[in-house]
Image (cartoon, helix red, strand yellow):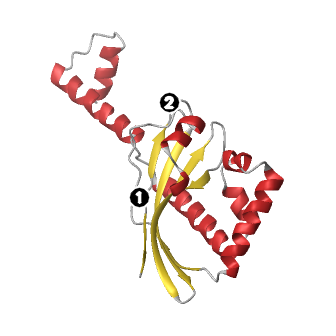
């Protein structure tokens, strides 16, 4: 109940008289909650959604499902590949090479929780850490990486780009409102 009194006091209704300490604690709590949201706090359903998206996208890459890959690819990537037709042709070649090389996804796990970030505008971002084990030519490769997701203002869903393609130059050109101080997960690959 003290928080209601604090709000009334802030709004200029001075009849209730909470202690300064109660008001200070209330506003510190609110500030911490807002900071947690701004720095990546998310609901379980948000986490499940982006992890499901990433699982679907990566599965599509290794199964050769071009339509799904295109559906989850950020429009800026499609544009950078020369537009829809050119992007489809380029991605079809990449997926065919993946298939002809016999590359198979053995496992995909999420080693850390996704980090949700708010841009200066209304654009939302998510960084989804991944650990893949890939089979190719009788060898196994472990890859730690991430998917960089973007939800545009008014957009219903997320679109993604592969983490090793995300550079400071790309971020400043395509997403100037992305928090520049964010530290991305380390990318590494090794034979198992």
User: Looking at the image, is 22 positioned above or below residue 153?
Assistant: above
Q: Residue visible at 54% across and 90% down?
A: 138
Q: Can residue 19 be seen from the camera position used here?
A: no
92 relative to 40 in the view: left or right: right
Q: Residue visible at 40% across and 56% down?
A: 185
Q: Nearer the viewer, residue 127 or 122?
A: 127
Secondary element under disc 1, as helix, strand or loop, is loop
User: Residue 143 at x, y = what percent?
Assistant: 46, 70
Kindly identify which numbered label has been placed on residue 120: 2
Query: Marks 1 and 2, Cα distance to the nearest angstrom?
Result: 23 Å
User: Residue 164 at x, y = what percent?
Assistant: 51, 56
User: Looking at the image, is 122 positioned above or below residue 67?
Assistant: above
Q: Quadrant of the C terminus?
A: bottom left
Q: Which residue is mark 1?
A: 113
Q: Nearer the viewer, residue 182 or 40?
A: 182
**Label 2: few (<14), some (14–19) or many (≥20) C-alpha neighbours in 10 Å:** few
Precedes in sequence: disc 1 or disc 2: 1
153 relative to 178 in the view: left or right: right
**Looking at the image, which residue sits at the far right?**
85
- Please report contact status of discs 1 and 2: CB closer than 8 Å, yes or no: no
Q: Residue visible at 52% across and 33% down?
A: 177
Q: Residue visible at 40% across and 66% down?
A: 111
Q: Can residue 38 be seen from the camera position used here?
A: yes
User: Residue 60 at x, y = what percent?
Assistant: 66, 70
């Amino acid at each position: 109940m003290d928080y209601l009194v604090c709000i009334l006091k802030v709004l200029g209704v001075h009849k209730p008289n909470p202690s300064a300490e109660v008001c200070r604690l209330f506003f510190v709590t609110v500030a911490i909650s807002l900071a947690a949201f701004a720095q990546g706090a998310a609901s379980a359903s948000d986490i499940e959604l982006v992890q499901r998206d990433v699982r679907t996208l990566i599965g599509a890459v290794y199964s050769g499902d071009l339509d799904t890959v295109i559906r989850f690819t950020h429009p800026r990537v499609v544009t950078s590949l020369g537009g829809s037709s050119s992007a489809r042709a380029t991605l079809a070649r990449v997926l065919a090479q993946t298939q002809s090389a016999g590359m198979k996804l053995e496992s995909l796990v999420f080693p850390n929780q996704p980090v949700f970030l708010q841009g200066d505008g209304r654009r939302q971002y998510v960084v989804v850490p991944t650990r893949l084990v890939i089979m190719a030519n009788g060898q196994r490769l472990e890859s730690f990486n991430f998917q960089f997701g973007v939800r545009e203002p008014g957009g219903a869903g997320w679109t993604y780009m592969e983490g090793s393609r995300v550079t400071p130059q790309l971020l400043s050109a395509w997403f100037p409102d992305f928090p520049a101080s964010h530290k991305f997960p380390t990318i590494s690959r090794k034979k198992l």
